Image: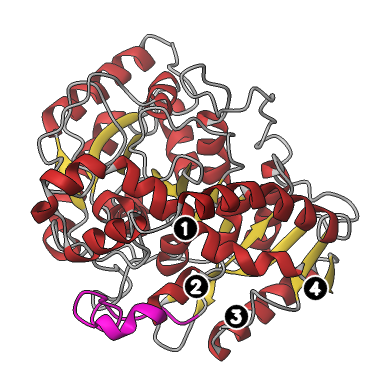
Amino acid sequence: MSDTALAKLSLSAVSEAIEKGEVSSEELTRNCLERLESAHPRLNCVAGMAAEAALDDARKADQVRSSGQSLGPLHGVPLAHKDMYYRKGRVSACGSKIRADFVPEFTATVLGKLDAAGALDIARLNMVEFAYGLTGHNEITGNVHNPWNLDYITGGSSSGPAVSVSAGLVYGTLGSDTGGSIRFPASCCGLVGMKPTYGRVSRYGAMPLSHTLDHVGPLTRTVRDCALLTQTIAGADPNDRTCSTRTVGDYLSGLENLPKGLKVGVPSNYFYDPIHPEVRVRMTESLKVFKDLGIEVRELAMPETIYASNAMVNLIAGVEGASHHALWLRERSQDYGTQTLGRLRAGLLYLAVDYMEALKLREVVLQDFLERVFTQVDVLHVPIVPIPVPTLEESDVGANPGFIDYISQLGHCTRPFDYLGLPALAVPAGTTSNGLPTGFQLVGRPFAEATLFQTAAAFEAASPWTHPIED
């Protein structure tokens, strides 16, 4: 099989090929490393690689396989992750100058779970500085470029992860989502991305930005791959007290079984308020696919309380981010990028009473949302990026301060579900006239990840998509 053919395989297909002995982990890993190295000068997606160590791990995986044993469902599959997941003894720079030489003394729970499933961790991937930004710009490490068109943003803060998977450099990755940082780049790069229910996946060993809003989840090219990685990393963790002990469902066995009587809701207000006509067209077309599948699509009004959620996320993330960075803001402010420094300093200005009110209001808004929405429908269908993907130049807040209001609107559709902690799955929905992808998110009740995957799998089967994987 050619190198390009290998790159085009899904994560699930690669896992199956390894199991059947059709390809070795070493061959796959070498191909991914070479593709990462070759693409990096053009895409700026790699924060660091340890090629020899990765190849050595691949050879060990092959030796285990040759003995008739299996390390798990991801045996020998090469993955790479956002440069904010700590691995003992390895640098985790978090897209920053401040942590350029930071070497943690422990490994993130999610990396440990992937290790236990047999996956290989072959590279660290570039990201927005300290994961604080939706566009993907980074003054410290340089901007990552969208493989669909290098002049356009990748979305952030999981910029390198989204690019690497979309371009066929690796088979899957972990991102993080505090205000949309999994779903936003998934939409910009044509990927599937899961922001699980708050507490479904451990954050232990993941760089914190906002401890009450941070979510961990995967980005992949297919729904099945996303379900597989989510299945692998989900579950209780005694090292993360916010992590739920609720049993993890089986996201894979019933993936092709669309629930009977499924109802999909479409917001009549809030989420479509800032939507560009081209994005609206793609949303309408995607809803027609669901209707053609025999799914009931029902329009419904969003509760008025949801209008406060965007501002609440800005407030909470601002305060908690400033708290995490307080010492560095005092002692190393010159080492931040301009945009990150400005946003973190703004967090110092919020009143404690406003922060506490934002946290208390969260439960009220969630209960109102569950009662008004999920008593009528099973899944909510919502846009992700409200406009066609912008260029790097036109969305550069640092170079165009007057665009701050414009940029703040980019998270209009994603931030509410970080605030509510509800599971939200990004799904590709074609391209706009600039040739860049757009997508929608499927949102469900708490811990309804399985239903979201089933719904997305039905759409994917009816409306498949491709990626810009080059020879």
Which residue position holds label 3? 282
Q: Earlier in the sequence, mark 1 or mark 2?
A: 1
Which residue position holds label 2? 385
Determine the residue positioned at 25% across, 64% down.
Answer: 342
Which residue position holds label 4? 301
| Labels 2, 3: front one | 2
Front residue of 429 and 360: 360
Amino acid type indicated by mark 4: Ala
Model colouring? secondary structure
| Labels 3, 1: front one | 1
Marks 2 and 3, Cα distance to the nearest angstrom? 12 Å
Please report the bounds of the magenta region as a residue range. Answer: 387-405
Amino acid type indicated by mark 1: Leu
Q: Earlier in the sequence, mark 4 or mark 2?
A: 4
Determine the residue positioned at 66% across, 56% down.
Answer: 456
Marks 4 and 3, Cα distance to the nearest angstrom? 21 Å
Q: Which secondary structure lies at badge 3?
A: helix
Query: Looking at the image, do the residues carrying marks 1 and 2 touch, with CB atoms under 8 Å apart?
Result: no
Residue 68 image offset from top left, x and y in percent: 43, 11
Marks 3 and 1, Cα distance to the nearest angstrom? 32 Å
Q: Earlier in the sequence, mark 4 or mark 3?
A: 3
Marks 4 and 2, Cα distance to the nearest angstrom? 20 Å
Quadrant in which residue 300 is drawn: bottom right
Q: Using a 10 Å C-alpha cutoff, classify the residue at mark 2 as few (fewer than 14 neighbours), some (14 to 19) or many (20 or more).
A: many
